[in-house]
Amino acid sequence: MTKFRTAEEQRLATTQKLVDAHVAKLGGRADEARFQLLEATACRLGGFDLDGYFEAFGRRPVSKSAKLLDIARGVVEKIDASGIPPALALSALARERLDSSRQRADGAYHTDYRLALRLASHVRDALVPGAKVVDPACGAGILLAATSLAACGPDRILAADWLSESVYASDMSEMALRGTLIALASLTNDLNALLKMRSRWRVQDSLLEPRRSWDALAPGGFDVVIGNPPWEKVKLSRHEFVRGQGGERHYGQSFADLDLLGYDAGRRAASDRSTELARRYRTLGDGEPDLYVAFTELMIGLTKPGGTGALLVPGGVIRSKGTEALRRFLLARSSDLEISVLDNKARFFSIDTRFKFLSISYKSRSPGARTGSAISLSHARWSEMGFEAGNVVKIPRKLLGEVRPDLTVPEVRDETEWKIFLKAQRAGLDISDPDSPWFPQFCREVDMTHARGQFSKASTKNALPVVEGRMIQPHRFGAKRYLGGEGRAARWSMTPPGSSGLHPQFWIGRGSLAPSVVERSSQLRAGFCDITGQTNERTMMAALIPSGVVCGNKVPTVLFPNDPGEDRLRLWVAIVNSLPFDWLLRRVVTTTVNYFLLLGLRLPSIQPDTLPGRRLVEISKKLADHDRGPATFDNAWRIAKLRAEADVLVARAYGLDDGDLLRMLEDFPLLDRGQPLSPADTRSTVTRDLVMATWCKGRPGFGEPWAARVQAAFNANAIPYLPSELAGSLMEVRDAK
């Protein structure tokens, strides 16, 4: 994932620069000097006595307090200019400095101040005097600082009572708790309140701490539990071990000359921790434990009946196969469950902007009380005005279990989308039954990384061409041809419809393949590109894969062992390439189409021997024929009309109506980019118009307006379904009359 400075880091850049400059001048250990300067800054904000603070918490000053306080004045000014609440800014500045290896090992994706304020708002109503609040993996305490601000505002007297009675914290790092203390100290001038609060904090592995220790702190549980738990798995690779020891290594480099002393002991320790976590937390699945899963179970377990909680977790909580037990636990233990989907476009974390995550708030169910009747799902987006909440969709738990037995939650954005999703899935066929003729056999034929040493750049005797993901487009095998170059610098060009062909980058000898793969490569099967996205031009891209080629791991292939005929393969390709199926897939996918997702989506009730099934098989055959030529404007339109007919047949089988289909088509805004415009349009919607004209054909008063739009687009040389990469390429290439 791409790394960059977060928005929070950018806002605090000048403050951080000032702190670093003064720390360099103060001398001594850099970390100690930095913390003491930040403690002096907290003193200026909170108004407590700095010398008394140092004495109370056992600090040996690196410089005279007057000097530190003088420097701190400038830090306060910079913080004020950042626009970040001072307590939250101090927390961000006090975070431990972790390299990428340590950050990955700890799963420490620090909480952005905006997210901290959002989570605090979820629990605001429970922040009453005497309430007990805990963050069991607090880091530098930004969530506790935001919660305290929500509880007390600028009132220092109220803050002193709140801190002394209500705030609990735990972390594996003593330095992290020191940062938490700095952030919260800026809210009060009462050293006794800070001492009392700090006496309740624990340096510990919260996941392995005995329950009796938590009960001693809060008999019966905490009123509020808040957190952004670590997002990594419990594991130790040799690469991460070397980097964690300060060594330098790039992926692919041999370990022969690297110092691995201590690696075996570290791996055993990680294994022991994994075993113990799996024993304690029943929501953890098989394999390497996800820390956020265990922490979510812990946090709910720490919440008193009737108490509330809020946390940040990866999007996998609502969509991954391995988190089904956690979803069931959440639903069973909560009476109110609110899930908000967020993405990283506002640069909350220094990872890919497409990354999705969740804020979850819940109310712990009291014994004997009923669980909530519905999940509240929303999508939120950050703007400079704050978080803009989308529509709240109420998803009844019973209906969710009916169409999603694994309780994965579709990312519907309003009630209309939920009704469409529910309608289509109720009308669909469950293909997860191993006895179903639709039950698929998936296969990844060649691992492109592990087998790379066996690839050749030229065809040789007994070698098979290797099919890569970019070569697959809807209904098109060989949609891109290799031109040259290596790795990320490899050059490819997309071929226009009607000119698909096999132009691979690599070949591999049959002798390098497992016998089962050689056998599979000798037969017709379906394949799809598994790298995708919810907001791509198209999400599902599948095609028939001919015999005599082998597919790389980014092109999983599909067979139907219970009905091995060619017609079912062609029908499957026609269905999954349809816009209605693509719309359903976009509700549950993030960046990869995996087997779990495909098994969980119901196909429309169509069989190869039914009237619509036979027509879809015929369309699939014709599309393959047309893609072998000619590469002309008119042939591209013949292809488009067939694809629109397939979309309509699938939509009817899903039981959709006019409004449903039109709403689905609105979810593909990148379609038709670059297509020429008819005089009345500001952007091309030729694909939507063709589908709706086909849908309404023969209905007086409904079809004519759509047909008129299609004709206008045709006259302007627009082509439906054409990838934007090819926009304009066939505009002037008309069939000879």
Image: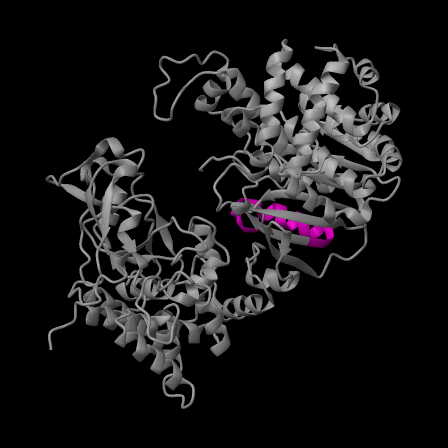
Q: Where is residue 357 in the image (x, y as percent from the top left)?
A: 57, 46
Query: The N terminus appears in which quarter of the rendering?
Result: top left
Residue at x 18%, y 50% (from the top left corner) = 548
Residue 68 at x, y percent in the picture? 72, 17
Q: Check residue 274 for magenta coloring.
A: no
Residue 243 location (% of width, % of height): 47, 20
**Left or right of 730, for residue 253:** right
* Up/down of 347 relative to 668, above or below: above
Front-lying residue, 336 or 97 = 97
Q: Is residue 466 above or below residue 256?
A: below
Q: Give above or below for 735 relative to 500.
A: below
Q: Is residue 281 visible?
A: no
Q: In the image, residue 363 lies at what x, y percent?
A: 75, 50
Identify the colour scheme used. Answer: one colour
Using the rendered view, name the quadrant where residue 693 is placed.
bottom left
Q: Which residue lies furthest to the bottom in this view?
A: 700
Q: Is residue 717 left or right of residue 581?
A: left
Magenta segment main secondary structure: helix
Quadrant where the C terminus is found in the figure = bottom left
Name above or below for residue 638 compared with residue 336: below
Q: Which residue is drawn at 77% across and 29% down?
A: 45
Q: How many numbered badges does the structure rendering display?
A: 0
User: Is 317 placed left or right of 436 in the picture?
Assistant: right
Q: Is residue 664 visible?
A: yes
The magenta-colored residue range is 318-337
Q: Is residue 323 magenta?
A: yes
